[in-house]
Image (cartoon, helix red, strand yellow):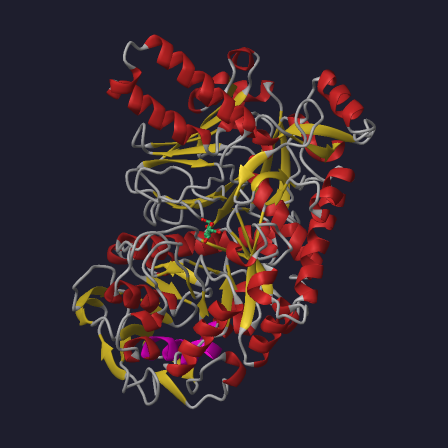
Amino acid sequence: MVKKYVFGTPYKTLSVVNEKDTECIVVNDNDLNNQNTVMPNPFNKVELTCDGGDYFHESLDVMEVQKYKGFKAVITLENNSKVYGLGLQMGSINKRGRVYRSFCTDDPVHSEDKQSLYGAHNFIVINNGNGDTFGIFIDYPGPVVFDIGWTNTNELVIATENANLNIYYIKEETIQKVVHTFRTMIGKSYIPPFWAFGFMQSRWGYASKKDLIDVYENHKKHNLPLDAIFLDIDYMDGFRDFTYNKDAFDSDDGENGFSKCVKELLDKGIHVVPIIDAGIKAEKDFAVDREGVENNYYCKTIDGNDFLAAVWPGFSHFVDVTQDSSRKWFGNLCKKFLDDNNLSGFWLDMNEPAIFYSKDGVEEFGKKLVKWGAQCENPVGSDILTWKIKDAVLGVQNNLSDYKSFYHKVPKTDAGGLAQSTTQLNCNLNEKSSGLLNSENDVFVRHDKIHNLYGYLLTRAVGEAINTCSGDPAKTPLLFSRASFIGSHRYGGIWTGDNCSWWSHILLCLQQLPALNMAGYLYTGCDLGGFGDNTNRELLLRFLALGIFTPLMRNHSALGTRRQECYNFGDTDDFRAILSLRYRLLPYLYDEYLWAANNYELYFRPLAFDYNDSESQNCVDQLMLGRDIMIAPVYTPNATGRAVYLPCNMYQITCTLNNGCVTGDGENILLNKGFHWVKCLPNEIVFFIKEDHKIPICNAACSTKSLDKTIVTYWGCQ
Ligand code: GLC
């Protein structure tokens, strides 16, 4: 049963595409005085008040607060209620005990204190036990706060800055049914091509043909399977999208050496996937940018100028993703770049959008420095000033005032209550941009109010142009993004962004996976080995041991960190074993992915979704995968194994280099339901198959191109 509560005039996000069995209830302000008759049971308080802004006042101007109508809903949590979801977020599988802020953020330090990452996935499921389960989706494009039992242990508070939103309430008997219903509402998840389940190597710093060939040759030399190599920003000419560095790729004969190099690799079975960043270098001599300026494809400031802010290429322009014409333009640029260069897809980055600094931001910072300097007798020797400066420097990046200083052009019918009412603004913009606004049909919306849609709409632009929803995975390019909002799962996957080479980030990834699946993101995974910081052999092996089960299996690391390719840690046999096992499992894993995508099911589930016993209900470091298996990766250093809880009788499969990973059968022991200490050294892979179930295994291969998918054996029940 689904009910949609409409407050004010919501922005049309198109997150939900199927409202077939949805009852729609329009909530008038007055109804809220008598809210029990309007809202379902779990909402014990819904307010349209500036109180909703308790969480937001810091981000509002004083004038705004006075005329402000925010939204706040309070739901009582039972002592044993569990709350799941929120997609890409910090925290454990059960989200209780923290405050979360949906606000797509470029933050490379995923430490425990963080409230926002790159995605805004406002879907939660509350399980009160005894069949009392429901889901809530907050369909709202701006910042949303979820205070899940942090301020008050037994209260879940949801607040938005503005009272124009849809709340979907989904009541079903089980968590899985709630999620299934939600997933049918938001439409089918992206299905990648089979090769995108192969092992992929990436590093910020690969800059030339030589770098790519080097990765390929090393994998070949050490018999390490490989399906794709990623190109980070260094392949570009000065970080300009849709260009490549001619010096690094072209040969003397002036031929397009980039496309040639990509083709050579493709012929060897290696797909090349470049990064595309959201910011387009602002430069008169850059043809792409000129086209964007001339056709008003970019976001505008209040004076009618194109909004400018610095990212990797320096000052850049930002595609106005709410305009059909801008999206088509950007998408077609991607399509042409892909076709011209034999590329196999894209990873979209910096599309929160990330902003390093704006001119105004830097000026503001300068003014502060002058003011503080004048107030301080000895600025050079002042430690207080030093701290103030440090905070001010950090505050320049991804600053809210920058997000409030530009506008999107939006069809009137979509913008709802978020439309900018200031007619002066419309005049400014219109005058400067020669009738940019067709006031009959379009309005402006300030970016911060729809900030969370940026990555989604950019993914949509590219997905529509390169046809990622064709329904024919074999012909589908690979596409995944960093920023996201529910809806973009139909066009591509996401990766979990800039994690670190930290042991805790293996567990963090494991805990994010089911929540991402709940939000529709099935094609997902983390930077294996960790992006920031320096990994070591053992940590990389343990990351990979989780990665062989994640649909997106990519080793990626940051510039300046220790080299992280599998052939940089001495003996490569252990790495060969792990990567080979991935290929032996591929037909099974891809099938389970198709099952999950086509049936709106979860590829990864917490044990609590499948089993009711209290051990399963409280287990936060193991996952069910597909219909048959359970994984329990090791995520602590110097471990020889770990404790594992089996929610039913299961086969323990242990694979090693000589026993299962590359050839032969893994060791197979049937264990009883309950707790077990399971030995698992860094060069072993252990996973579990439910009693009475078996999974198909094929022979290992060095890429999906040479993989023979014929099933040679079954593991599990014989
Ligand atoms: C961002 C991305 C990271 C990439 C880097 C350079 O930090 O998240 O994956 O390597 O930018 O492009």
The residue sitting at 69% across, 49% down in the picture is 330
Camera-nearest residue between 269 and 656: 269
Quadrant position of residue 581: bottom left
Residue 558 belongs to magenta span: no
| Residue 363 at least partly seen | yes
Q: Quadrant of residue 75?
A: top left
Split into 4 quadrants, where in the image is the C terminus?
bottom left
Q: Nearer the viewer, residue 366 or 570?
A: 366
Q: Percent x, y for residue 650?
A: 28, 74
Q: Residue at x 50, y 19 (%)?
A: 60
Residue drawn at (51%, 40%) of the image:
354
Start and end of the magenta stretch?
577-589
447 relative to 597, above or below: above
Q: Is residue 438 left or right of residue 329?
A: right
Q: Nearer the viewer, residue 417 or 555?
A: 555
Q: Is residue 618 visible?
A: no
Q: Say above or below: 601 vs 438.
A: below
Look at 69% across and 38% down and name the residue there: 298
In the image, residue 579 lies in the stretch drawn in magenta: yes
Which quadrant of the figure has residue 74? top left
Whole-percent x, y for residue 331 in the image = 69, 53
Secondary structure character of the magenta stretch overall: helix
Q: Is residue 243 above or below residue 441?
A: below
Q: Horizontal and vertical percent for residue 35?
A: 52, 24
Q: How many marks?
A: 0
